[in-house]
């Protein structure tokens, strides 16, 4: 029982830190950055779900957070499609402030 409680606390924290590490490392593609942001949000969602279930509170805020994360993901993918259509790829090196 204690191992289950410890794993439910440490796994989401490890998820968030792994997502932050990938986000801050030298990524060449915009898609990798967007996927790491979604992984961070999934870890935060997991932390919120576990903490609210331990407290015995309502889960409306968690559902609101999940809907905001889904909207953020859709917005990120639409920006990715727009950038790929205008620039031809999603490399960071090919972007210029003067072109946008």
Image (cartoon, rainbow, N blue to C red):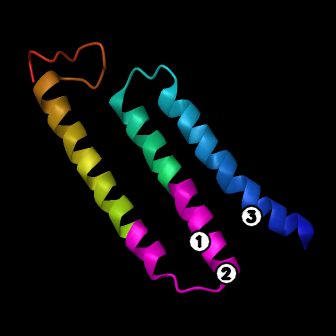
Task: Please give the name of the residue rendered at 55% of the width and 40% of the height, measured from the top-left corner.
Answer: 19
Label for residue 13?
none
Rendering quarter of residue 27: top left
Q: Point out the image quarter for the N terminus.
A: bottom right
Q: Which residue is more in the foreground, 88 or 74?
A: 74
Give the residue at mark 2: 55
Q: Residue at x 62, y 39 (%)?
A: 18
Residue linked to disc 1: 49
Q: Quadrant of the C terminus?
A: top left
Q: Which residues are magenta?
A: 42-65
The x and y percentages for residue 71 are 29, 60
Residue 47, given in percent of the width and then of the height, sits at 61, 62
Mark 1 and mark 3 in contact (Cβ < 8 Å)? no
Which of marks 1 and 3 precedes in the sequence? 3
64 sits to left or right of 3: left
| SS state under label 3 | helix
> Residue sitting at 68 percent across and 46 percent down?
14
């Amino acid at each position: 029982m204690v191992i289950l409680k410890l794993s439910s606390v440490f796994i989401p924290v490890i998820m968030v830190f792994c997502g932050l590490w990938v986000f801050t490392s030298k990524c060449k593609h915009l898609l990798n950055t967007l996927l790491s942001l979604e992984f961070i949000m999934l870890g935060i969602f997991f932390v919120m779900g576990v903490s609210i279930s331990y407290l015995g509170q309502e889960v409306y805020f968690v559902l609101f957070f999940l809907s905001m994360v889904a909207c953020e993901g859709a917005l990120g993918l639409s920006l990715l499609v727009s950038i790929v259509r205008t620039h031809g790829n999603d490399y960071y090196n090919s972007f210029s402030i003067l072109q946008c």
